[in-house]
Amino acid sequence: MKGRKTTKFVTWAAVVFFIGTLFPYAYGAVDGGLKQLRTFVNVLEYIKENYVEPTSTDTLVTGAIRGMVGELDDFSQYLEPKDYDTLKDDTRGDFGGLGIRLSKVEGFVTVMSPMPGTPAFEAGVMPGDRILRVDGQDVTSMDLDAAVELMRGPAGSKVKIVMSRKNEKTGKYEELPEYTFKREKIVPEVVYYRMLPDHIGYIYLVDFSGHSTEEMKKALEDLTKKGMKGLVLDLRFNPGGLLTGAADVAKLFMGDNQMIVYTQGRKPEFYQEFKTGKTAPYPDIPLVVLINQASASASEIVSGALQDNDRAVVVGQRSFGKASVQQVLPLSDGAGLRLTIARYYTPKGRMIQRDYRDKSKANEGGIFPDVEVKMKPEDEVKIFMQYNNIVYTPGKSEPEAHFTEKDPVLDKAVEILKEGPEKIIAKKADTAKAQQEQAEQEAGSETPQQKSAANEK
């Protein structure tokens, strides 16, 4: 009996210590959640005494923390000491990868896009594929960082991965044969550009990495010298990257201290604005931006900023919806907590982050195109592979450009540029004005009873 009391005391101490360590303000909420804490302690104690195998209090409390944080969203994460050390370690130059951009979607580690010229791309890995097992280890319920860590390793080493792919006819995911990859140091090109007929420039931006802006500038300078009269900026299958890269790309086309994006959380200090400078190098070039369901993060910041400021027409399909801010807090035991503290919003206040867990919010988040062009996923993948085949890895010969697949999204963009994107932008403004006037009329046509009730409130 004495042993049980001691165990219960230790458990309570662990719980209170955990609450105090993670959240300094949580003590004020202990009274309100006392019943839940008692239930937690009772369950923990029962497991310790009756589970088929001996289990330590540390293991159970750590599991509880991980489960609690995991309930919040796909990006908040409890980091065990070794994972936290990895996060802090910036010297990973000797490690190789597969060239897969990943995200957590509906609880699964999901491929956003394989990088051109990498092992994953050459093996035929497709956007939307789900990672199931890495070297025989199940990653379906694993944190994204933990799964990525399993895939990393010394350049030249091998790793076996099992994935599943969605069958477009049945809508179900089917397991694929096991892949064996040889890790490589991944340094892909990030910008491909060419001149289309009628002096329309085309830039395909693979991601927003450290040198994306410089490569964009070079492409724009070359296209301008060749007489560019309009531009298509292709952000399809672009999973994002650095916020600074997104802001710098937007600044190429927007000036006058315009809003690019802002962050907002529960606390005032989490509010932050990102604006353009006074001038932009290309403020007047007619511009169309292409997006699809795999355009995420920085891609959505750029397309949303250009769209809200009436600087570009956005064409394609609704974007992925990934734009939240995480803060990493060190914990006393060497672990860490990565917590979502804010979300990104477009200049007009649209939340970019999409809640895939709550089906009632299906119409919230992501960037909606001004002109929607729907495509079958299999056709879109063919176009993706076509463009990515011409983006090469430094050190390898640059392949010739062969365009055989029809691209209705690009065709629509060219059509808009020929007709004048300002027509669509003007139409958007007229529609927004009409909607505002209608809302004002509806508000002004309240019955006397409604107005009286509103005044009483």
Image (cartoon, helix red, strand yellow):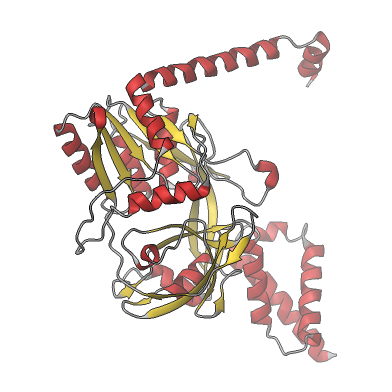
The residue drawn where x is 64% and y is 69% is 65
Q: Nearer the viewer, residue 398 or 427?
A: 398
Q: Which residue is more in the foreground, 427 or 266?
A: 427
Q: Residue at x 66, y 10 (%)?
A: 441
Residue 149 picture location, percent across and down: 45, 73
Residue 439 in sight here: yes
**Residue at (34% x, 41% y) in the render:** 247
Q: Would residue 240 be visible to someone looking at this image? A: no
Give percent across and percent down for residue 156.
31, 79
Residue lying furthest front in this view?
404
Give the residue drawn at x 38%, y 62%: 121
Q: Could you tell whether 111 is left or right of 356 in the image?
A: left
Q: Is residue 426 above or below residue 279?
A: above
Q: Name the residue nearer the viewer: 456 or 67.
A: 67
Q: Nearer the viewer, residue 372 or 340?
A: 372
Q: With 386 as the anchor, is 343 left or right in this view?
A: right
Residue 200 falls in which quadrant of the image?
top left
Image position, residue 290 (x, y; %): 40, 38
Number of numbered markers: 0
Residue at the far right in the pictured view: 1
Q: Is residue 367 above or below residue 175?
A: above
Quarter occupied by residue 136: bottom right
Left or right, 319 with reference to 98: right
Q: If the image is split into quadrants, where does the N terminus sit?
A: bottom right
| Percent x, y of residue 20 | 62, 66
The quadrant of the picture occupied by the C terminus is top right
Q: Is residue 35 left or right of residue 409?
A: right
